């Protein structure tokens, strides 16, 4: 490996430190930046990927992780996003097991430590990319971390764009992918250190590097792109191929690869073949596992990809690239979601935003020309590898090879930001070399680092709760319907329906086809008994998305409330058609049949609900009550005992079964269940009242004889009657 010349490195406006202290400083800065998020909640996508993901539970076989996507859905499902990250889900499962449940602190701490580990590992990676792991000082070799790599690693550790990956638990996919990406690259470098001969390699380390690249891909899809970086590093650094010279010779008549630098021996071609075959094999297996079909995204996920004109698509894709570049340059306006109108489409070249993509390509072409045409071999190396590290990991998110499910996503910039930090460090070094005001430049650099640290602290605080996160996005993306939807949902969950309605209406106004906002708004209006408007909204939602099962069910509930029973039944049936395993819909269908006195149908519907969800307490309760009311006490008792065996701590089931037992003259069991229900829920007036009736309904008579048989009865009866009267007065009308 080539060594970094101290004459090139000493001009960097940064202190020089021994490797241990350099890693300590980088690790400490990375921890400080994001430590504020350690006790945050599960927010945004964390709910679906972690809290509601059955793959994290012990009862789910480990083998299922290899057949499910990141969100716990089967990869073969039409609704699957095809995000295959089983190793990341496995770490979530281990987290869940060690923490004894869904305790967000443990999940956040692991993310923070992973970011710190990646930042520290980048010190070694940057040292290699900048020219070596050691450099010479006064003619002798010393173990000092190059200033360039230290500065680049500090810039990476404190970059605010990383907040989503670190503070959002689902960002662990990017953190793990980056970790194994870097290990794969360092493993490839090891292939040449292990060989004693110049230009030779260790095939074992090359193969291990490919394996680590596959592991990175099983954490996050873009991990496989490390093989491209390995190839560029091999060609430029190991084989010392001048790309411009190679292109010129190939264009010359009669030229061949054998006459060009590192291609004279078969080593480079053999390694390139290994990388190509290994990468193709891994991608083929990934494609087969995914079901050989791309995920199905909608227009709201990525509107530019649905544009009819290829020119419009190209302009908007390039505009998205410029926005990503701006987030790296100025990470001040950060948002958890950039979809749904946050970035309006550019529909003509007259749009002033076209200047942004012109500026981007001007910079990229300028850097590329410098990388290819410079006579300084070290400059060519740093610029080419920096651009490679910036561009190659970003390619899967570029829409060039397949449609992606987002417009801009800060999380996909985690690895590309390392290339940006490398290029920025090279720029500072070039400025420092040509200016006499080195102290001023160092002060500017320190100011940038401090501002970034402060921005990380502020942004980490915003990721601590959904309310803060969603409200922080309102000023960044006021046109984003999903932002208003999420603010409204958060308010609705807290019981503030009036404010929630306002945000839901704004979401629907910004995106008239936003069916989820219509569904939630219709639900609130239904609860407020504004049934006509609720029906209009839900009917429109199912017209826009005919397979929206939840909207069909809610429409059925509204129609049932409006006494339109046939329409309600049809809506419930349609919901079940689109989602066969839908216990809540079976429950509501049972309620409809009960209202129509179709008792057998009601019992069958509720039984279906309990089969699909054995812990469905409401369905069990309704079965017990219906059987009780129709005089089927023996069957009601059997159903009640079956329900309590499955849900032993449900006080409402205890109460319903106690009523049945009392009517069946099983007073001792009835009393015991009433007392147990009261202990679990002491504020229920009906529990106390029915317990009192049990004491008064013994065969010996309501008063004296019963008390003689049950010495506890007088005291229990008195307290129960008093509490019943008291609770009744306190309960709402």
Image: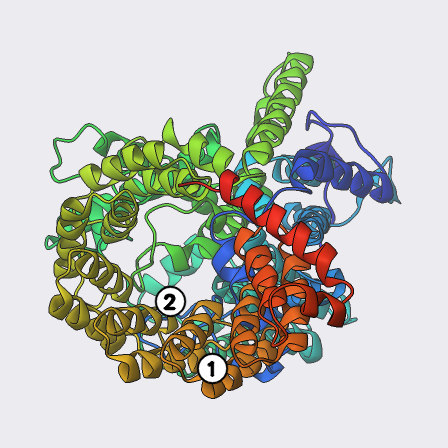
Query: Residue, x 58% and y 84% (percent of image)?
Result: 63
Tell me how many marks there are.
Answer: 2
Left-right relation of 509 to 638: left
In front: 336, or 607? 607
Residue 158 found in image quarter: top right
Q: Earlier in the sequence, mark 1 or mark 2?
A: 2
Q: State which quarter of the image contains the C terminus.
A: top left
| Image coordinates for residue 536, horizontal then vertical, percent | 12, 50
Residue under numbered circle 1:
636
Occupied quadrant, residue 230: bottom right
The residue shown at (21%, 38%) is 510
Tell me if residue 23 can be seen. yes
Of the pair 43 and 415, the residue shown nearer to us: 43
Q: Nearer the viewer, mark 1 or mark 2?
A: 1
Note whether 411 is above or below 506 in the view shown.
below
Q: Residue at x 72, y 44 (%)?
A: 4
User: Residue 381: where, in percent of width, then height?
Assistant: 56, 48
Measured as percent of width and height from the top left, residue 78 is found at 31, 75
Give yes or no for contact between labels 1 and 2 (Cβ–Cβ under 8 Å): no
- Which residue, given by chain and number where applicable, does mark 2 sit on? 81
Visual colour scheme: rainbow
């Amino acid at each position: 490996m080539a060594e970094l010349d101290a004459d090139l490195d000493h001009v960097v406006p940064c202190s020089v430190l021994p490797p241990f202290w350099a890693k300590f400083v980088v690790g400490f800065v990375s921890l400080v930046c994001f430590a504020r998020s350690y006790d945050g909640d599960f927010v945004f996508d964390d709910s679906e990927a972690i809290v509601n993901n059955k793959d994290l539970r012990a009862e789910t076989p480990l083998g299922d992780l290899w057949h499910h996507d990141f969100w716990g859905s089967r990869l073969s499902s039409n609704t699957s996003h095809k995000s295959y990250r089983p190793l990341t889900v496995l770490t979530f499962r281990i987290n869940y097991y060690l923490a004894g449940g869904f305790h967000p602190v443990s999940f956040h701490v692991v993310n923070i430590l992973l970011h710190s580990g990646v930042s520290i590992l980048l010190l070694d990676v940057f040292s290699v990319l900048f020219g070596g792991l050691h450099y010479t000082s006064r003619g002798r070799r010393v173990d000092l971390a190059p200033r360039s790599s230290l500065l680049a690693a500090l810039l990476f550790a404190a970059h605010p764009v990383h907040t989503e990956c670190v503070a959002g638990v689902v960002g662990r996919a990017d953190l793990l992918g980056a970790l194994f990406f870097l290990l794969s690259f360092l493993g490839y470098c090891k292939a040449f250190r292990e060989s004693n001969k110049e230009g030779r390699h260790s095939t074992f380390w090359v193969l291990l590097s490919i394996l680590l690249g596959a592991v990175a891909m099983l954490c996050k899809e873009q991990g496989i792109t490390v093989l491209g970086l390995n190839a560029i590093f091999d060609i430029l650094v190991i084989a010392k191929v001048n790309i411009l010279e190679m292109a010129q010779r190939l264009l010359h008549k009669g030229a061949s690869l054998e006459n060009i630098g590192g291609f004279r021996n078969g080593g480079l071609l053999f390694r390139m073949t290994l990388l190509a075959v290994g990468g193709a094999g891994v991608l083929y297996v990934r494609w087969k596992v995914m079901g050989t079909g791309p995920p199905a995204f909608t227009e709201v996920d990525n509107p530019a990809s649905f544009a009819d004109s290829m020119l419009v698509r190209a302009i908007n894709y390039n505009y998205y690239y410029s926005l990503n570049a701006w987030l790296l340059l100025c990470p001040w306006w950060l948002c958890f979601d950039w979809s749904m109108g946050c970035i309006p489409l550019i529909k003509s070249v007259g749009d002033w935003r076209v200047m942004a993509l012109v500026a981007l390509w001007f910079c990229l072409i300028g850097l590329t020309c410098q990388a290819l045409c410079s006579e300084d071999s070290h400059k060519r190396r740093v610029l080419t590898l920096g651009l490679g590290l910036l561009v190659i990991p970003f390619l899967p998110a570029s829409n060039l090879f397949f449609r992606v499910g987002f417009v801009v996503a800060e999380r996909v910039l985690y690895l590309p930001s390392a290339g940006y930090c490398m290029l920025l460090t090279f720029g500072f070094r070039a400025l420092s070399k040509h200016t006499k005001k080195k102290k001023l430049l160092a002060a500017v650099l320190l100011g940038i680092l401090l501002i970034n640290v402060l921005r990380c602290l502020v942004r980490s605080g915003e990721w601590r709760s959904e309310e803060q996160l969603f409200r922080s996005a309102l000023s960044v993306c006021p046109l984003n319907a999903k932002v208003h939807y999420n603010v409204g949902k958060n308010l609705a969950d807290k019981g503030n329906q009036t404010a929630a309605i306002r945000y839901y209406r704004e979401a629907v106004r910004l995106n008239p086809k936003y069916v989820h906002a219509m569904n939630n708004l219709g639900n609130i209006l239904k609860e407020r008994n504004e049934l006509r408007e609720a029906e209009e909204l839900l009917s429109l939602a199912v017209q826009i998305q005919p397979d929206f099962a939840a909207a069909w069910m809610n429409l059925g509930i509204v129609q049932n409330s409006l006494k339109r029973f046939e329409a309600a039944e049809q809506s419930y049936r349609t919901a079940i058609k689109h989602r066969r395993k839908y216990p809540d819909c079976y429950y509501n269908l049972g309620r409809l049949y009960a209202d129509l006195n179709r008792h057998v149908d009601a019992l069958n519907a509720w039984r279906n609900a309990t089969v699909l969800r054995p812990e469905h307490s409401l369905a069990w309760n309704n079965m017990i009550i219906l059987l009780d009311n129709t005089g089927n006490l023996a069957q009601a008792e059997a159903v009640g005992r079956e329900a309590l065996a499955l849900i032993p701590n449900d006080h409402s089931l205890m109460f319903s079964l106690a009523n049945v037992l009392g009517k069946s003259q099983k007073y001792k069991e009835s009393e015991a269940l009433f007392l147990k229900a009261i202990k679990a829920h002491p504020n229920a007036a009906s529990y106390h009242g029915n317990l009192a009736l049990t004491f008064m309904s013994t065969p010996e008579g309501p008063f004296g004889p019963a008390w003689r048989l049950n010495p506890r009865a007088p005291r229990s009866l008195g307290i129960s009657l008093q509490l019943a009267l008291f609770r009744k007065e306190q309960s709402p009308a």
